[in-house]
Amino acid sequence: MNRIAIGVLAAACCSYGAAAQEDGKALVERTCTKCHELTTTLLLHNSWERWSSIVDDMVSRGAEATDTEIEKIIDYLAKTQGLKINVNKADTNELASALDVSTREAAAVIEYRKSHGNFKTLDDLKKVPALEGKNIDSKKDLLEFSDPK
């Protein structure tokens, strides 16, 4: 193989590696803003399944992304723009997903809720010892604190 061919191959591998490392936010910005503003997307809160359907529809309309990038986009949107979760009703798996913590930590939140009563604010939730050091402030827009009915 000559030097030019090796250089082209190396450049292709590097650009593929960079794309593979691109995070969900950057992928959403790069892919979705070709057709519409992000403010439209960021106002929506959908389940993973609904985001998957929306992204599939956008791909059918011409959005360009690899299968791996599509998965990253859906995961990013579901995690950051998912449905609001009521921390006073949620089960272990729902809390683990919404707070991006382990199921053990989510179970500790439920135990704390049982022994101390329902959470009224994000500050109440931060009092759970298992969440110490966790960045739950970034999840505040995905959380509800109303009393279960």
Image: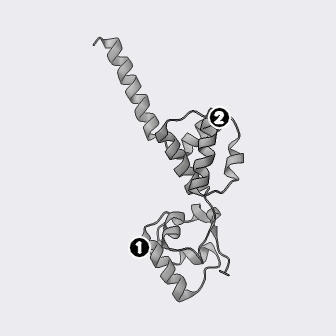
Residue on which the image places disc 2: 61
Q: Where is residue 12 in the image (x, y as percent from the top left)?
A: 40, 24
Question: Which element is circle 1 on?
Answer: helix
Find residue 43 and name its label: none
Q: In which quarter of the image is the C terminus?
A: bottom right
Color style of the picture: one colour
Question: Which element is circle 2 on?
Answer: loop
User: How packed is label 1: few (under 14 Cα within 10 Å), some, or many (20 or more)?
Assistant: few
Q: Is residue 23 left or right of residue 39?
A: left
Q: Is residue 93 left or right of residue 36?
A: left
Q: Which residue does the image show at 68% across and 44% down from the upper left?
A: 38
Give the amino acid at mark 1: Arg
Residue on which the image places disc 1: 104
Is the residue 110 above or below the residue 9 in the image? below
Is the residue 6 above or below the residue 26 in the image? above
Q: Which residue does the image show at 52% across and 74% down from the upper left?
A: 91
The residue furthest bottom is 115
Q: Position of residue 97 (x, y in %)?
A: 51, 64
Q: Which residue does the image show at 39% across and 29% down from the upper left?
A: 14
The earlier-in-sequence mark between 1 and 2 is 2
Residue 86 falls in image quadrant: bottom right
Q: Is residue 37 left or right of residue 126?
A: right
Q: Position of residue 69 (x, y in %)?
A: 50, 40
Q: Where is residue 109 in the image (x, y as percent from the top left)?
A: 50, 77
User: How packed is label 2: few (under 14 Cα within 10 Å), some, or many (20 or more)?
Assistant: few
Q: Quadrant of the N terminus?
A: top left
- Give 58 or 126, whichever is nearer the viewer: 58
Q: Which residue does the image show at 35% across and 18% down from the upper left?
A: 7
- Give 5 or 126, whichever is nearer the viewer: 5
